[in-house]
């Protein structure tokens, strides 16, 4: 845009056009002026008048004072597109999870996750909202993993993700030496209007599918995870002065002579938290939660900090950790290794025997850990009351249980689902499966970390602070009480009603009165289903009924924990939001200022997005290893539970190893089965036989597809199973009358209920 001043009419049209192309964004006049290169004071004053005129004429809205956004008309909305494996799609266009159905061939050239503009068709009575993509505003990604199929003059790449509904056309000059059938990474070049397939180029060849190295590298590429740190980042990290100096120690509170230890997994290398404990002369117990002082070494806006921002989180695949920080920091300088002086940022509490807090202090410290414990070692001490530092550990366990009991009263929900882990050989092949479950040792650490996180959030977020930490200190510019919160919203009434309806079929009841009663009711439910056949499914659906926790500067509390204020302070080695909280806390304690709410909110959004990406990559790596683990078990029979019921088949999870596979609906034998979406089941039309969510079944492993990362099962029919065609009943060990009622008739298929949503197939 020219820097010469434009007539008001022209500026009016150009501002409106700019806002139309950025319809999902909110701008103040300064941001808008900078983006449109309006540099003079006169143009900016003119811009304010134009924005007011657009608002008065109904073109823009002013949601907050001085912040403008294009007003969404009834015909157009913007949102994120989510494809199904059949090529249809849904566009989510509001935080309330409303969506628009996009029929096949109405998605323009959009790909999974793109931000799109949608034209809304007139809604017919009784029909869901339907629309057509008219503009791709922003691509979610431009790199994709798939398998290449080579022809004499060209090639196609078939994407790994079933969410990518088209294949990529590859010109022969862009194959990059790949061989037919190999797994590759492609970069999108163009997708012209009217063309059936996007054009891409191969940028990396992983090798033939089905091998550990190929598949794990492909997963990393699919989710945009880096294989290593850039050379300049590694070089900068090696130049950091990691020495512990007397000058710096004198600035800190010294805990080196107080009993301190770490408790971590047996294979951990980065120890970012430690506990100290001592008895005070006033009769109280002083417990220190000491967190690695990452920000002492990770200076703001440096190349190291920018790389940490980009990564935002460490990622833990089944065979490796992709760290947020270089090893010199994560495993050495910042790792609280035993018998080494280490800088920390600490939250220190004085508690009585009932774990009531009488005093708290936050600040920079230096520690020297006496012992590195594993969870297993601490669990043995708790159970046997014997071992190193047994009196300290037993006391901490007692205090932790008091803190936990108080959390329970306040509505904290306790999900205790087992985590699947693998034993791997030197080649990365899975040799066994085990489950990571929480015992008292894990909960001991968790309770004190929660206490520190909650207390720091309250200290930063509340409008007034009574802590002695700020006595005699002048506070500056803390009117906003800036904090990076970890929030967890209250679940929707619809989700809770759905969960309540499901568990009622097993004889359980939920009290959905207040949010506190709902939380207590969910806890009771999770306790009642322990060791029952429906335990896994009830726990899974309870988790799925909850909103996702996110990072934000706007506090809405943490429903799952029952906390009004909550943040992440305790893992700065592996989470960037914790780094931000350390900087905010240091700024508050010193009376300085760190960042602005707008900048922090952008970092929060990025951190939440990267957390989701990391979780998806971790699940993909686990799924691959599960399939790999089962590849030599074809034909074997296992006890399982039905973990999902969909219109295209039944998911079953093997009890002994938690590997999940599908029995396709077309492979169901003995009858013609109808999918009953409302009741999570298939019902035999003639026999009345039911396959329902949560049922115990026996399955046979039919296939382990390493390329698609899928397990295919079949039901293992026994000789005791019989069909009496005369009586029209199917006899086996499943009580098929359990769900029958006048309201729940078989054969209903209302929109395709799948594993976690009646609304759409994701």
Image (tube, rainbow, N blue to C red):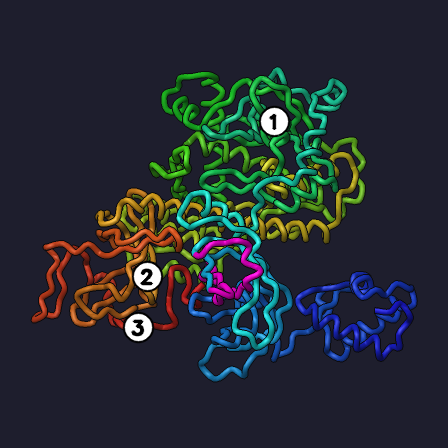
Mark nearer the N terminus (3 vs 2):
2
Q: Nearer the viewer, residue 507 or 697?
A: 697
The residue that label 1 is drawn on is 332
Q: Is 337 in front, or is 219?
A: 219
SS assignment at label 3: loop
Q: Please identify the quadrant where the N terminus is shown.
A: bottom right
For the residues labelled 3 and 1, the Cα–Cα distance comes to 60 Å
Circles 2 and 1, Cβ within 8 Å, touching? The answer is no
Of the numbered discs 2 and 1, the one sitting upstream in the chain is: 1
Label annotation for residue 131: none
Give the farthest residue toward the left.
Answer: 726
Nearer mark to the viewer, of 3 and 1: 1
Q: What residue do we see at 49% from left, 64% from top?
A: 156
Label 1 sits on a secondary structure element that is: helix
State which region is magenta: 152-180
Could you say which disc has been placed on residue 645 in the image?
Answer: 2
Q: CA distance from mark 2 to mark 1?
A: 48 Å
Q: Is residue 358 above or below residue 455?
A: above
Q: Which residue is mark 3?
A: 748
The vertical placement of 144 against 586, above or below, is: below
Q: Is residue 433 left or right of residue 701?
A: right
What kind of element bears circle 2? strand
Q: Quick check: marks 3 and 2 in contact, CB under 8 Å? A: no
Residue 593 placement (x, y as % from top left): 78, 42
Q: Residues within 10 Å of mark 2 (few under 14, many from 20)?
A: many
Residue 330, quarter of the rendered image: top right
The quarter of the displayed image where residue 255 is located: top right
Q: Position of residue 474 (x, y in %)?
A: 81, 36
Is 165 a magenta residue? yes
> Toward the viewer: 606 or 107?
107
Tell me the distance, in whole angstroms, between the alpha carbons under discs 3 and 2: 13 Å
Residue 630 seen from this side: yes
């Amino acid at each position: 845009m020219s820097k010469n001043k434009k007539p008001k009419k022209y500026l009016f049209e150009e501002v409106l056009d700019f806002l139309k192309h950025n319809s999902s964004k909110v701008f103040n006049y300064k941001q808008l002026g900078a983006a449109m290169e309006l540099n003079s004071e006169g143009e900016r004053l003119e811009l304010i008048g134009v924005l007011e005129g657009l608002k008065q004429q109904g073109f823009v809205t002013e949601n907050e004072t001085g912040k403008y956004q294009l007003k969404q008309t009834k015909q157009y909305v913007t949102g994120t597109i989510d494809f199904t494996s059949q090529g249809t799609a849904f566009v989510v266009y509001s935080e309330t999870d409303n969506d628009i159905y996009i029929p096949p061939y109405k998605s323009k050239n959009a790909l999974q996750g793109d931000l799109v503009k949608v034209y809304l068709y007139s809604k017919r009575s009784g029909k869901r909202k339907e629309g057509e993509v008219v503009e791709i505003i922003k691509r979610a990604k431009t790199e994709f993993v798939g398998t290449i199929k080579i022809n004499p003059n060209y090639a196609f790449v078939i994407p790994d993700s079933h969410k990518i509904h088209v294949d990529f056309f590859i010109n022969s000059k862009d194959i990059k030496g790949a061989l037919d059938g190999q797994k590759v990474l492609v970069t999108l070049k163009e997708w012209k209007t009217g063309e059936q397939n996007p054009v891409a180029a191969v940028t990396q060849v992983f090798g033939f599918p089905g091998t550990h190295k190929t598949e794990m590298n492909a997963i990393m590429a699919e989710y945009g995870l880096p294989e290593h740190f850039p050379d300049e980042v590694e070089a900068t990290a090696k130049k950091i002065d990691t020495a512990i100096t007397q000058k710096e120690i004198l600035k800190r509170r010294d805990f080196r002579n107080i009993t301190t230890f770490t408790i971590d997994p047996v294979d951990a290398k980065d120890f970012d938290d430690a506990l100290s404990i001592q008895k005070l002369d006033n009769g109280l117990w002083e417990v220190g939660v000491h967190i690695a002082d990452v920000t002492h070494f990770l200076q703001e806006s440096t190349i190291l900090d920018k790389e940490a921002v980009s990564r935002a989180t460490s990622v833990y695949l089944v065979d490796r950790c992709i760290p947020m920080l270089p090893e010199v920091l994560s495993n050495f300088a910042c790792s609280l290794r035993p018998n080494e002086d280490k800088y920390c940022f600490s939250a220190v509490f004085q508690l009585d025997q009932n774990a009531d807090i009488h005093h708290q202090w936050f600040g920079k410290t230096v520690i020297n850990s006496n012992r590195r414990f594993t969870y297993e070692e601490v669990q043995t001490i708790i159970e046997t009351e014997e071992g190193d530092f047994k009196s300290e550990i037993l006391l901490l366990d007692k205090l932790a249980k008091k803190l936990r009991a108080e959390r329970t009263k306040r509505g904290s929900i306790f999900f205790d689902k087992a985590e699947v882990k693998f034993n791997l050989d030197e080649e990365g092949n899975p040799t066994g499966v085990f489950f990571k479950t929480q015992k008292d040792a894990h909960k001991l650490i968790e309770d004190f970390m929660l206490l520190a996180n909650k207390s720091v959030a309250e200290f930063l977020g509340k409008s007034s602070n009574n802590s002695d930490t700020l006595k005699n200190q002048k506070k500056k510019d803390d009117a906003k009480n800036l904090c990076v919160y970890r929030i967890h919203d209250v679940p929707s009434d619809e989700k809770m009603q759905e969960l309540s309806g499901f568990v009622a079929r097993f004889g359980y009841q939920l009290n959905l009165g207040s949010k506190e009663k709902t939380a207590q009711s969910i806890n009771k439910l999770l306790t009642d289903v322990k060791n029952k056949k429906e335990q896994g499914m009830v726990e899974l659906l309870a988790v799925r009924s909850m909103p996702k926790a996110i990072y934000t500067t706007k506090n809405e509390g943490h429903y799952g924990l029952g906390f009004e204020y909550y943040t992440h302070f305790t893992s700065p080695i592996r989470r960037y939001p914790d780094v931000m909280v350390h900087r905010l806390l240091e700024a508050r304690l010193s009376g300085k200022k760190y960042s602005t709410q707008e900048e922090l909110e952008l970092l929060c959004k990025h951190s939440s997005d990267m957390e989701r990406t990391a979780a998806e990559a971790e699940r993909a790596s686990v799924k691959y290893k599960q399939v790999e683990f089962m590849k030599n078990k074809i034909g074997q029979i296992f006890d399982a539970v039905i973990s999902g019921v969909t219109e295209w088949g039944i998911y079953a999870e093997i009890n002994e190893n938690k590997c999940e596979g599908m029995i396709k609906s077309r492979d169901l034998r003995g009858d013609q089965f109808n999918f009953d979406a409302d009741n999570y089941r298939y019902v035999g039309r003639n026999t009345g036989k039911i396959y329902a969510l949560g049922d115990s079944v026996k399955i046979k492993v039919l296939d382990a597809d390493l390329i698609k990362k899928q397990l295919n099962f079949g039901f293992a029919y026994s000789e005791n199973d019989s069909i009496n065609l005369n009586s029209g009943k199917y006899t086996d060990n499943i009580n098929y009358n359990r769900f029958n009622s006048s309201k729940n008739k078989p054969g209903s298929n209302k929109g395709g209920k799948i594993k976690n949503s009646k609304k759409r197939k994701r």
